[in-house]
Image: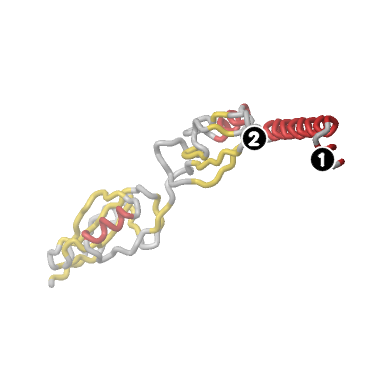
Amino acid sequence: MGFFKFIFSKTFLIQLIMAAILVIAIAFLALRWLDYSTNQDQRIAVPDLAKQSLDEVEDKLAAQNLRFEIMDSANFNPDFPRYSVIEQVPEAGQFVKENRKIYLTLNPSGYRKVMIPDLIRKTRRQAEPTLRSLGFEIGDVSYKPDIAEDAVLELRHKGKKLEPGDELMKTSTIDLVLGDGSGRYRIGEDRQDSTTTAEEEIEF
């Protein structure tokens, strides 16, 4: 009976209330500390960094207590300045905490070089889609006497003959020299012109 009498006594009830108040106070202080330490109330809007240089990015993010890291370089985009920001994560307008790292993708200095495939004696119908798929543009199309009509005899860029395995900047223009299907070919070449000068002509 003494135990039950103590539970319902005034002294026990006062101690129980004091313990409950102490637990609530500790929990409140712990939550407040957690909010402060994790910056729950701090919201920084990520700025738009598109087309900005690294110097501009560094100044802008430092002013907002944000950091950045360069992730990669994308394919060259002529609509963006060289070495400027093409993409960012998180995106502009999103809210982050102080000292958050912004991941950047930069525009490279120019188009990458692409290897010229071996298209000699391929047909024009085969050559043009292949070159376009590699990112090249088709320029002038000229013809030389040859037994095969529309067969690729030469690839040229700015007047210079290209060999398979040569590397050329993507989006470069390539001129095609094709056979005219006349049933003959000529040996000898005029160095001053892309057309062949007849030194010897062989009929078939």
Is 106 left, or right, of 23 in this rendering?
left
Left or right: residue 194 versus residue 71 is left
Which residue, given by chain and number where applicable, does mark 2 sit on? 99
In the rendered structure, are the residues bearing label 2 and label 1 in contact, judged by CB atoms less than 8 Å apart? no
Residue drawn where x is 28% and y is 60% of the image? 154
| Earlier residue among tags 2 and 1 | 1
Label for residue 152? none
Q: Position of residue 40 (x, y in %)?
A: 63, 32
Residue projecting furthest to the bottom? 204
Look at the image and tell me in which quarter the N terminus lies.
top right
Element class at badge 2: loop
Q: Could you say which is closer to the camera, residue 165 or residue 15?
A: 15
The one of 125 and 66 positioned closer to us in this rendering? 66
Residue at 84 percent of width and 37 percent of height: 5
Label 2, label 1: how far apart the Cα atoms are? 57 Å
- Pointer 2: residues within 10 angstroms few (<14), some, or many (20+)? some
Question: In the drawing, does residue 24 fall left or right of residue 167?
Answer: right
Kindly tell me whether residue 108 is visible in this rendering.
yes
Q: Which residue is most to the top?
A: 63
The picture places residue 137, in percent across and down from the top left corner, at: 30, 49
Q: Nearer the viewer, residue 172 or 198?
A: 172
Residue assigned mark 1: 4
Could you say whether the residue bearing mark 1 is in a helix, strand or loop? Answer: helix
Q: What residue type is labelled 2?
A: Asn
**In the image, residue 166 lies at what x, y percent?**
40, 59
Image coordinates of residue 24 in percent, x first then y, are: 73, 32
Q: In which quarter of the image is residue 161?
A: bottom left
**Mark 1: few/some/many CA within 10 Å (<14, 14-19, 20+):** few
Q: Residue at x 59, y 31 (%)?
A: 61
Quadrant in which the C terminus appears: bottom left
Above-or-below relation of 44 to 135 = above
